[in-house]
Amino acid sequence: MIDDAASRAELNDSLAALDRAEGAVVGRASSYADGFVVPSHSHGRAQLLHARSGVAMISTSFGRWMVPPDHAMWIPAGIVHSVEMMGEVGMRSVYLEPGAVTDAPPDLVVLGMTDLMRALVAVATDRTAANDSRHNDLAMALLVEEIPRLPIRPLGLPLPSDRRLLARCRAFLAEPAREVTIDGWASALGMSRRSFTRFFQRETGVSLGLWRQQACLFAALPRLADGESVTAVALDLGYDSVPAFTTMFSRMLGTAPRAYFRAAG
């Protein structure tokens, strides 16, 4: 994991350059090695972070979000976050002035990319495109209009603020194959099943079952993107069968794992 003084200095220089940049839309393209960490930071512009390849993990004090290949992360201005690369990551980011996007998502959210948005982000991050200012201005105006139209993907993993519950959630993330039951977690926290269900929903905004599915996706996506077999990943995560894992994956992302990564490729 890389998060040292040199990377912090490089980040500060990058943020300063972003503050000096002119225009409502600023694009940047970059590549990162496996394990590289962009330290915690925030910026005055909103960010659309597009992972062209590899998987990026965005972390904040109140949750984590997984950005798999061919998805994007909407990060509102002023949100403190870090970015960890899981595999080699090719990234294109578009930074937008506050208020530039009408009906922009108010919170962090993972978005699916469309063919049109991929092309527009490519224009935004292509330094030579600025040579044709009229074409670039038209493309950026369309990009701003298209952001609210992108489909939202359930790839966020909210983390509770309660210390005891947070410890259990982190233990599961470290070993996602372990059994998770409402009764088991309720008993461990000294609560009734009903009280725990309400408590978990209040702390995370989702049910324990949905949280577990999202956590399993977090564990599965980097491995699948790295070429591991669906069978190996499903069994390692504690699923009784590959069809059961495939059903969960399809419910969460709209298609089976193999078809999903063929499309992303």
Image (tube, rainbow, N blue to C red):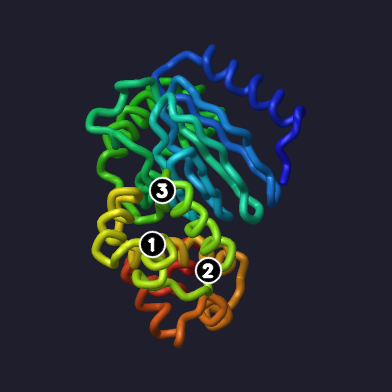
| Mark closest to the chain's N terminus, 2 or 1 | 2
Asked which secondary structure carries label 2, the reply is: loop
Residue displayed at 42% across by 46% down: 162
| Mark closest to the chain's N terminus, 1 or 3 | 3
Residue 257, image x, y percentages: 45, 73
Q: Residues within 10 Å of mark 2 (few under 14, many from 20)?
A: many
Report the residue that reaches farthest toward the front.
190
Residue 94, image x, y percentages: 46, 32
Q: Is residue 244 above or below residue 110?
A: below
Can you identify the residue that label 3 sits on? 160
Asked which secondary structure carries label 3, the reply is: loop
Q: Is residue 217 above or below residue 44?
A: below
Q: CA distance from mark 3 to mark 2?
A: 17 Å
Residue 131 seen in render: yes
Residue 151 seen in render: no
Can you identify the residue that label 2 sits on? 176
Mark 2 is on which residue type? Answer: Pro
Q: CA distance from mark 1 to mark 3?
A: 17 Å
Residue 96, image x, y percentages: 40, 25
Q: Residues within 10 Å of mark 1 (few under 14, many from 20)?
A: few
| Mark closest to the chain's N terminus, 3 or 2 | 3
Residue displayed at 35% across by 78% down: 247
Mark toward the viewer: 3 or 2: 3
| Residue 60 badge | none
Mark 3 is on which residue type? Answer: Pro
| Residue 190 badge | 1
Foreground of the two, 176 or 235 = 176
Mark toward the viewer: 2 or 1: 1
Q: CA distance from mark 2 to mark 1?
A: 23 Å
